[in-house]
Image (cartoon, grey):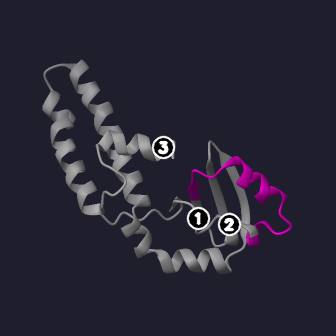
Amino acid sequence: MKKIVEYRKVLGVDKNAELHDLKTVYRQMMKTWHPDKFAESEESKSLAEEKSKSIIEAYHFLVSIASETRLQTIDIYRQTTSASALLDFEFIDQVLTVYFADGSVYEYFDVPRSVYIKLINADSPARFARRHIYNAYVYRSTSKLVASA
């Protein structure tokens, strides 16, 4: 969640921002912070490059977790989470990354450590994940990122 909030601050949008809003804000900010507009000094150009990189990163991340993006790929997601075997998973800073047998990789955000512990201790981690993780947390695909905006 920390990452999501941080990226929303970078673009200055709230949690209800839609793809169209993200795209509009992104374009406006890139017009302002494009490095070519700061050719007068190396210092200002490098600052603009850093700022534009953070804008691009925030935009792509927020697009990947937007509800419209998830709706476009919901059938693939359901197929993966219901039919593909869970190969492995890792947990870092409340982000649970799940690796599937079909090659898909999904990140789930703001997963409490207690849920991760229950996943580890479950008799069937795949069944536990289907019941308590797959539809309960904001997620994005990291193996097959969809750039739809």
Q: Sort mark 2 into few (<14), some (14-19) or many (20+) by Cα contacts within 10 Å.
A: some
Position of residue 84 measured from the top left corner of the image (x, y, whole percent):
67, 76
Q: Amino acid at mark 1?
A: Ala
Q: Is residue 64 left or right of residue 26?
A: right
Element at label 1: loop
Q: Is residue 54 left or right of residue 41?
A: right
Q: Please say whether residue 118 is one of the residues in the magenta stretch.
A: yes
Q: Please say whether residue 149 is one of the residues in the magenta stretch.
A: no
Mark identifier at residue 132: 2
Comes first in the chain, label 1 or label 3: 3
Q: Amino acid at mark 3?
A: Lys
Position of residue 149 measured from the top left corner of the image (x, y, whole percent):
29, 63
| Picture residue at 33% right of the left edge, 50% below the top | 14
Establish if 20 lies above or below 73. above
Position of residue 10 measured from the top left corner of the image (x, y, whole percent):
33, 39
Q: Sort mark 3 into few (<14), some (14-19) or many (20+) by Cα contacts within 10 Å.
A: some
Which residues are drawn in magenta? 107-127
Q: Report the residue marked by disc 3.
A: 3
Q: Is residue 116 left or right of residue 144?
A: right
Element at label 3: helix
Q: Are marks 1 and 2 in contact (CB under 8 Å)?
A: yes
Q: Amino acid at mark 2?
A: His
Q: Report the residue marked by disc 1.
A: 136
Q: Gap in Å between the C-alphas at discs 1 and 2? A: 6 Å
